[in-house]
Amino acid sequence: MVAKYQKQITIANQFSGLSVKDYLKQIFLPKHLRGNLRQERGLRVNGQQVSTAHVLKTGDQLTLTFQEDVFLDQQGPYPVNIDISLVVVYENEDLLVVNKPAGMKMHPHSPTETDTLLNYVNGYFQKNPQKSAGQPARAFMVHRLDRATSGLVIVAKNPIVVPILNRLIKEKIIKRTYLARVAGRFDQKAGLFDQKIGNHPNDDRLRWFNSAGQNAVTHYQVLEEDSERDESLVRLELETGRMHQLRVHLAGNGHPINGDDFYQGKTGKRLALHSTALSLILPFTGEQVLLEEREGLI
């Protein structure tokens, strides 16, 4: 028997008066999943089967039911590792936010790798059994942090919520903020870097400025300056999310991050880059949660 994922949602006041179809669009449920719900009659309101034209009211209980095989690109499952206890900063039925240590990879690249964040999140679920969308919670990657970067990262618990979170990040509705200690002092205490980023001309592992590359925008604000050490503490916000974007924008503008061996940063124990804050919009309800975690930045 094919497993079912079933998500139950209490309709908030802000969505009252919307049809089911418009509600599903507004929460960024992908078109192919909306079509599946319609074709497989996977929509119920207060226990009664409905069409996508049904108009929702505050407090209605909307139930979405999916067969597992509709999630063709489903990740994992990733092997369980209980050796490390992660710091969980926020958690609900659909997702958790953890404080990733520097030096930890996000996900395994082979079945033999078991020392990545997603392995440890599955270990957390083994120690704290729970269900998400009607099935045992599992770790699903949403966005990435470089191995050398520490800080807040979102992990989904079911495959329904993954594309919704991805879209919320893409549309800049979920905002990510970083802290970095970098070389030098800035002429302007706030501004942006917007050089396009593409492949490095001499090293396939790296990225660099490239007029034919992808658009990339990083906003910065100087928080502290240390004239004796000739370095600054900066707050960074991503408008786009290119590989190594923060590292390349800072290094290419004369302010490599301390400890960045790839981009000529000052020698240090680790890369001094930390995902410090998330303005998180919760899928299905639209509720805003502000999270901040500074511990871990050197």
Image (cartoon, rainbow, N blue to C red):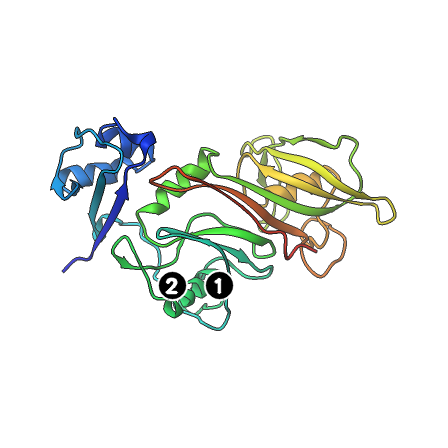
Q: Which tag, 1 or 2, sits closer to the chain's start?
A: 2
Q: Amino acid at mark 2?
A: Tyr
Pointers 1 and 2 in contact (C-beta within 8 Å): yes
Q: Which residue is the site of mark 2? A: 78
Looking at the rendered structure, the secondary structure element under dot 1 is: loop
21 or 108, nearer to the observer: 21
Whole-percent x, y for residue 151 in the image: 57, 53
Mark 2 neighbour density, 10 Å: few (under 14) some (14–19) many (20 or more): many
Q: Is residue 56 or residue 146 the one in the foreground?
A: 56
Q: Position of residue 227 (x, y in %)?
A: 86, 44
Instruction: Say if residue 51 shows up in the picture.
Output: yes
Place of residue 180 in the rendered image (x, y in percent of width and height, measured from the top left): 68, 47
- Residue at mark 1: 116
Residue in front for this viewpoint, 191 or 65: 65
Give the vertical position of 101 relative to 197 (above or below). below
Q: Residue at coordinates 76% horizontally, 53% vertically from top-left?
A: 266
Residue 138 location, x and y as percent?
35, 59
Q: In this rendering, is residue 168 above or below 276? A: above
Q: How many marks?
A: 2
